[in-house]
Image: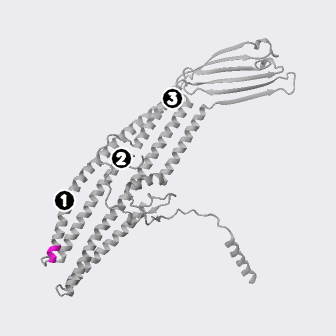
Amino acid sequence: MPNRIACVLLALVASAAAPPLVAQQVAPLPQMASIDAPTLTIDALLTNSARQSPQILEALARTRAADAKRLTAEGAFDTVFSAEGGSRLAGYYGGTYADAKVVRPIEDWGGQVYGGYRLSNGRFPIYEDKNYTNQLGEIRAGAVFSLLRDRMIDERRFGRVSAEADQAIADAERQMVAIGVQRKALDAYLSWVAAGQRLSIYQRLLSLSQERQRGLRRTFEAGLRPRIILTENEQQLLRREAMVVQSQQALAAAANSLSLYWRDAEGRPTIPRPEQLPQSLPEPMATARPDSVQRPDLMVARLRQRLVQDRLTLDRNALLPRLDLKMEVARDIGDIGPGGVSRSGNDVRLGVKFSVPLEQRTARGKLMQSQAELDANRTRAQWLDEQIRAEIDGIVITLDATTRLIGLSEQEMQRADDMAVAERRRFDMGASDLFLVNTREESAANVALSLLDMRLRRIIAGADLAAASGDAVSLGLH
């Protein structure tokens, strides 16, 4: 039994001393903003979100990957150096040769230019006669030109065009992500500011009840009012206190959501303090139909359509016969070698190579496929353009309607405030009761909340209009 206990103790000590298998990385919790933090404005939030948002940083990384892909495509036009050599180690012939060559593709014309140097020593059989050079070798230069197929476009140039399109698409998708993030940041900011405005409205209601409670207590103690009036106002005061607590909870939740889009220099989420609330809602970003639409998704659709058009050109190129022209100039230098005098002087060569598939089924199939894809992309781009225009029209209608509703709500709020003030005066003079006073005050508060919602809807519609039209400047993406 003691041995068993000792084994258990040793096992526990060993498990405690063993290092953890995997260290979990936990995202940092949101932190409160500093006490002396300034008022959080919408411009400051959008600027911070554009620089620190993880989604935008991720999209930026994808654009760097597209840049690397473009560099890879440019590698098809890299200059290539090659060399080879050989020697017969045994046998009747003992020739040795070496050949070096530099090839440079022609970027704007199908083909390549090249230069080379050959040197040989010893004797070669008749079927390797071309290996002979003079004593100091042979220098040569030449070019190959595509006259039909691959003259205007080929796989290398299409690869570069495709990489450029992918680069532009990645940048447009980055803009799409950024617009979406900024739009969500705006929603979070507006919800936070609106929650602060609602809290102020309920705090004013509570302040009226508290002030009235003090006055009623004095009149009750003086014997001028019955106890039931004081109790009734206490009930109303408790209900308004509950409204304030609920509004404070909503404000804290909105601040927590806003921390996802407001970060410190190290990228950690930061919860804004209530003291950082602005005095009022911001002005709408856009209030009129934009002159032009710069939507990244529409740009992506057009880029894909253009890429398919380039692929269609490549497929048509495959239907052409291949006709290549080759020109080369060579000269042996030095004393005459074992190959004889036939290597002396300049050697100018001109050659032609022709080939054509007889049935062209592969090329025709690819051409039909690209044509169908081009038609589909055109239809998709047209539908997207119409959808964007309809979306903008709907937002403009909402803007116009909310602007008119705000004017009506402002007039209604003025009258509701006047009625509440008048009812309080009548109550002080004994011409009204507490129920009517509370009804007038809460009616005025409801009108103020309705006006707040109308203004919030107009600002949201302006943000929607900026996002729908791709207005990067208004969204803090300039």
Q: Residues within 10 Å of mark 2 (few under 14, many from 20)?
A: many
- Kindly identify which residue carries mark 1: 411
Vertical placement of residue 28 versus 180, above or below: below
The N terminus appears in which quarter of the rendering? bottom right
Q: What's the amino acid at mark 2?
A: Ala
Report whether 112 appears left or right of 263: right
Residue nearest the viewer, comparing 152 with 205:
205
Residue nearest the viewer, comparing 354 with 426:
426
Which label sits on residue 315? 3
Q: Of tags 2 and 3, which is closer to the observer?
A: 2
Q: Main secondary structure of the magenta part?
A: helix
3D distance between C-alphas at marks 2 and 3: 37 Å
Q: Position of residue 176 (x, y in %)?
A: 43, 47
Q: Position of residue 409 (x, y in %)?
A: 21, 59
Q: Of tags 2 and 1, which is closer to the observer?
A: 1
Vertical placement of residue 413 versus 220, above or below: above
Q: Position of residue 149 (x, y in %)?
A: 55, 23
Mark 2, secondary structure of its residue = helix
Q: Position of residue 279 (x, y in %)?
A: 32, 61
- Kindly identify which residue carries mark 2: 468
Tag 1 or tag 2, which sits nearer the N-term? 1
Q: Residues within 10 Å of mark 1 (few under 14, many from 20)?
A: few
Magenta stretch bounds: 424-428
